[in-house]
């Protein structure tokens, strides 16, 4: 007894002595101490997470799941690569530290299997039970049989006789037949297959495959841990009893607790989360002590959590970051550390490795292909895609292999062979599916769920529905993009602005049409309200919860707050709203918007832009580099009623949401004193999305730059509250803008002023009063290299931006320019010329009779010639606003990046000197004319339109 006490005291004394000073006393921080393993554990975690993250960044370009990076990171850190460096394994991953690392990794594995259970929705199987069961069973029976057959040869060649063949056969069969459901969900989401018939079948089959696979794994572990057949039966009965206990009474109690604590309505409470986590570890403990692996208990615990109100998604959001960032990389790196590809050192080993790869793929692919082709009725291409997706092994097979290695059933060499097979099959899934199933061959599900009965030819091409009958040339089908809550008011007001007037009852009791267009071709004989596709965009992140939202898109359509508000807005205003939801990666957002508009057959895409506005400046207002001699009204800053004047204190530029730099620092490009670097980055990132929509759209696009909020309260009243101003310079985009203004002016609450502006020779009015243009450089081309002098902080933007998308047009020739000018004159004459009475001869009376013309819409047409057209346009808009007190003015302009009549860069440079500069991304996104109104602070909103590229000389 005294020896024991002395030993304990000596341990404490040794620790007190050895740890004094730590690193400063020359101690090695990587030295492993069983009494204090934290320091080395932190080093191990740092090395593992950093390696996996760097590999994930590279593999993400190839659209590969993160699990491949984690396993490859473990292989690189293991004996295959870094382990060959002398002293690396001894210092970083000593054998004594592996149990501590494994403990944390297994805790993470338990939590991950709980998240997998949360991810599985039994409703998916119920909705597609027949097809999912057919594909799932066929995709397990055939590979299980092939794997069992090959296992005999592998057992004789590589496995010790001490291992029973039946145990090895079971593990081999399970490894061959299982599918990685979590990785499969992410692949389906990233490839945008969740709304296709193929995606629904694969998702349903994957759920069933996962449940059966984990059950088979539990059976395999039970047989291995049982000393006799009777013990194995007891283990299985205990496991089944525990599962039934969880599924019925515990599930009912958990749902009662969720409702009692308000977790369904307001997210999981602390009490509910505490009970849930205790239940997870209790279930894992019970299944582990009865002889089944702990992960099975955690998986079943995830299945019983209520799905109402998005509760499972919210719980996942609370747990997934630590699991995916720390725990899972540890577990799969441990798999890599156990994988030594150097053991595959002879021809017979590599021959068996290739045989495992080929037979595993053929078995899974063949079983699912045959079931989908001859039982489910899919064509050959779609059946091949189903087989390829179900062949994805991912992390689920790796978990099975690790269980087999820890149980002593698999040798290190066989374990390495199967790990390589799992990596290869997972890696090839995404490129194979992309090649087999391009976008134009995909069949989408119907609005009410999966539609497996629609007719398609052998190539999977479906017949497009005929577009609905449309009245006249007015646009009545719109795709409204909703991505943020702050964009919602502007989109609602703009949608109400384009809503045509409802038919008024005539004296005979029949509805009549309020015709306000100046030509009969502009509105049809039947009144047709607009129809909108409310497209809710959610960015797909690396989190599991984002994938769960994709799988639960049907319920999100009913519960998403943005869609609910916009749907109610449509009901109150007679707007047909078709809510849709899309969860895609950031790089695919623009393409997804364009694809939805094409499928919806939209006439126009409405995109919002509301950058964050901050008080960028504190202190006195800066001095503007304007000449004191400047007395011309077109050179003065324009102040609108209710707008913040530039000479006001606190924030002299709050009326310009794009303002990035202090005007006083334009010469140096300094942004000192500005806390808006984050605002700049956000604005630039969103501009890339907008430009992506502009560049890929095959229909007209309207970008609404919200500078206040449109006053929609007066649109239905008798008193005019909304005024629209259009500076018409010419070109396809300006022609679209003019037609847009004519359409919205059918609304009795809207008036408009349209000014056709022609630029005269600048030499006529050159004076010293014009600011010198040498202060600001806008660049001489699309690259705008000189813009670096104004915006040095925007040279490096977020790494999320893959490129600089923009609309690219062909070279302009004389013929195209003449055709465009002719089209400008025709459309101006159509709307600006007062309608003349129609005179028709009467053969009987030999007199004339005038046919009454429709009333002219409330649009004032003007022509203006000025050497400074942008200044003149700003002044005209300001005058129009002052003449209509109480009204809000909306600027409508073309983007004019194609066939622009005038080059406004020099004058825009002068405007920036007067009012403040904006970044080049803003100008290239909305065009020079809209930028001029933005920097001048004119208007409560700016609508920028780009016409579909039907050809420069298209005359409507």
Image: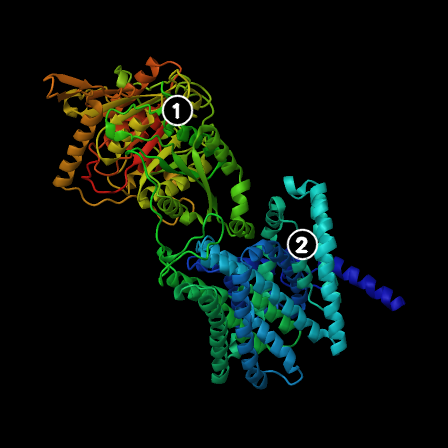
Q: Are dots 2 and 1 in contact, CB under 8 Å?
A: no
Q: Can you say whether 347 is above or below 288 in the image?
A: below
Task: Label 1, secondary structure: give it.
Answer: loop
Quarter containing the N terminus: bottom right
Dot 1 alpha-carbon crowd within 10 angstroms: few under 14, some 14 to 19, many 20 or more: many
First of labels 2, 1 by sequence position: 2
Residue plotted at (18% across, 33% down): 823
Is residue 530 shown above or below 163? above
For discs 2 and 1, the disc positioned in front in the rendered view: 2
Label 2: which secondary element: loop
Which residue position holds label 2?
Answer: 304
**Whole-Å distance between the Cαs marked 2 and 1?**
52 Å
Q: What residue sits right under mark 1 in the picture?
A: 940
Residue 351 in picture, x, y percent from top left: 47, 82
Task: Residue 80: tell me if it is visible.
Answer: yes
Determine if residue 288 is in view. Answer: no
Pick whichever, 792 or 29, lies toward us. 792
Residue 929 placement (x, y as % from top left): 28, 30
In the image shown, does 877 or 593 lie closer to the viewer?
Answer: 593
State which quadrant residue 758 falls in. Answer: top left
């Amino acid at each position: 007894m005294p020896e024991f006490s002395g030993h304990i005291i000596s341990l404490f004394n040794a620790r007190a002595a050895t740890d004094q000073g730590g690193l400063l006393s020359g101690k090695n921080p990587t030295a492993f101490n069983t009494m204090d393993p934290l320091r080395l554990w932190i080093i191990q975690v740092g090395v593992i997470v950093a390696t996996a993250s760097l590999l994930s960044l590279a593999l993400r370009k190839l659209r590969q799941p993160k699990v491949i990076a984690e396993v490859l990171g473990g292989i690189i850190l293991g004996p295959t690569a870094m382990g060959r460096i002398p002293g690396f394994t001894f210092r970083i991953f000593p054998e004594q530290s592996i149990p501590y690392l494994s403990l944390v990794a297994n805790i993470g594995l338990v939590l991950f299997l709980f998240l997998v259970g949360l991810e599985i929705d039994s409703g998916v199987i119920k909705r597609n039970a027949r097809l999912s069961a057919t594909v799932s069973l066929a995709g397990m029976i055939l590979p299980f049989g092939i794997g069992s057959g090959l296992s005999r040869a592998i057992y004789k060649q590589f496995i010790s006789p001490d291992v029973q063949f039946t145990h090895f056969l079971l593990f081999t069969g399970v490894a061959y037949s299982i599918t990685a459901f979590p990785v499969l969900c992410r692949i389906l989401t990233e490839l945008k297959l969740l709304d296709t018939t193929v995606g629904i079948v694969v998702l349903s089959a994957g759920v069933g495959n996962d449940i059966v696979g984990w059950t088979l794994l539990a059976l395999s572990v039970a047989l291995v841990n049982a000393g006799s057949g009777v013990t194995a039966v007891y283990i299985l009965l205990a496991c089944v009893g525990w599962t039934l206990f969880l599924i019925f009474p515990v599930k009912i109690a958990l749902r009662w607790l969720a409702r009692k604590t308000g977790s369904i309505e307001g997210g999981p409470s602390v009490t509910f989360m505490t009970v849930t986590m205790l239940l997870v570890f209790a279930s894992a403990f019970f299944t582990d002590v009865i002889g089944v692996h702990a992960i099975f208990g955690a998986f079943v615990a995830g299945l019983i959590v209520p799905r109402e109100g998005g509760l499972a998604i919210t719980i996942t959001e609370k747990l997934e970051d630590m699991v995916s960032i720390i725990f899972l990389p540890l577990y799969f790196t441990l798999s890599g550390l156990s994988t030594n590809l150097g053991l595959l050192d002879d021809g017979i080993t590599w021959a068996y490795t290739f045989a495992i790869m080929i037979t595993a793929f053929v078995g899974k692919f063949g079983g699912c292909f045959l079931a989908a082709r001859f039982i489910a009725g899919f064509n050959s291409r779609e059946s091949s895609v189903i087989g390829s997706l179900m062949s994805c092994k991912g992390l689920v097979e790796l978990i099975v292999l690790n269980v087999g290695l820890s149980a002593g059933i698999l040798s290190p060499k066989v374990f390495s062979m199967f790990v390589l097979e799992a990596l290869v099959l997972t890696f090839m899934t995404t490129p194979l599916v992309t090649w087999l199933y391009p976008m134009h061959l995909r069949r989408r599900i119907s609005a009410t769920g999966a539609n497996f009965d629609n007719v398609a030819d052998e190539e999977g091409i479906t017949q497009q529905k005929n577009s609905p009958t449309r009245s006249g040339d007015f646009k009545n089908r719109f795709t409204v993009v909703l991505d943020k809550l702050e964009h919602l008011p502007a989109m609602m007001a703009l949608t109400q602005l384009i809503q045509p007037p409802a038919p008024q009852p005539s004296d005979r009791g029949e509805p009549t049409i309020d015709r306000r267009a100046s030509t009969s071709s502009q509105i049809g004989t039947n009144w047709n309200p607009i129809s909108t596709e409310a497209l809710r965009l959610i960015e797909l992140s690396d989190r599991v919860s984002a994938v769960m939202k994709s799988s639960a898109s049907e319920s999100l359509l009913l519960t998403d707050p943005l869609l609910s508000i916009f749907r109610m807005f449509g009901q109150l205003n007679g707007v047909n709203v078709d809510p849709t939801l899309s969860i895609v990666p950031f790089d695919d957002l623009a393409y997804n918007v364009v694809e939805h508009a094409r499928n919806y057959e939209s006439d126009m895409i409405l995109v919002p832009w509301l950058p964050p506005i901050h008080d960028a400046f504190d202190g006195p207002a800066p001095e503007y580099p304007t000449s004191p001699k400047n007395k011309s009204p077109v050179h003065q800053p324009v102040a609108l009623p209710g707008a913040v004047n530039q000479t006001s204190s606190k924030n002299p530029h709050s009326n310009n949401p794009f303002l990035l730099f202090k005007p006083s620092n334009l010469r140096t490009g300094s942004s000192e004193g500005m806390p808006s670097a984050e605002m700049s980055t956000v604005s630039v990132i969103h501009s890339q999305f907008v430009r992506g929509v502009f560049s890929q759209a095959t229909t007209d696009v309207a970008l609404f730059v919200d500078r206040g909020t449109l006053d929609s309260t007066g649109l239905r009243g008798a008193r005019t509250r909304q005024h629209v101003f259009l500076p018409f310079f010419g070109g396809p985009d300006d022609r679209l803008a003019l037609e847009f203004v004519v359409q919205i002016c059918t609304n009795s609450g809207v008036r408009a002023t349209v000014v056709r502006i022609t630029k005269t020779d600048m030499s006529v009015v050159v004076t010293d009063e014009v600011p010198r243009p040498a202060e600001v450089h806008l660049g001489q081309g699309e690259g705008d290299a000189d813009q670096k002098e104004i915006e040095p902080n925007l040279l490096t933007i977020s790494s999320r931006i893959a490129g600089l998308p923009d609309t690219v047009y062909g070279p302009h020739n004389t013929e195209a320019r003449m055709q465009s000018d002719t089209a400008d004159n025709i459309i101006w004459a159509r709307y600006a010329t007062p309608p003349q009475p129609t005179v028709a001869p009467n053969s009987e009376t030999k007199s004339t009779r005038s046919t009454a013309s429709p009333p002219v819409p409330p649009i004032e047409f003007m022509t203006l010639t000025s050497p400074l057209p942008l200044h003149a346009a700003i002044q005209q808009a300001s005058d129009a606003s002052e003449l209509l007190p109480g009204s809000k003015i909306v600027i409508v302009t073309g983007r004019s990046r194609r066939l622009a009549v005038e080059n406004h860069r020099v004058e825009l440079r002068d405007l920036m000197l007067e009012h403040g500069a904006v970044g080049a991304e803003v100008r290239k996104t909305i065009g020079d004319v809209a930028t001029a109104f933005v920097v001048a602070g004119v208007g409560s909103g700016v609508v920028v339109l780009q016409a579909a590229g039907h050809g420069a000389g298209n005359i409507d």
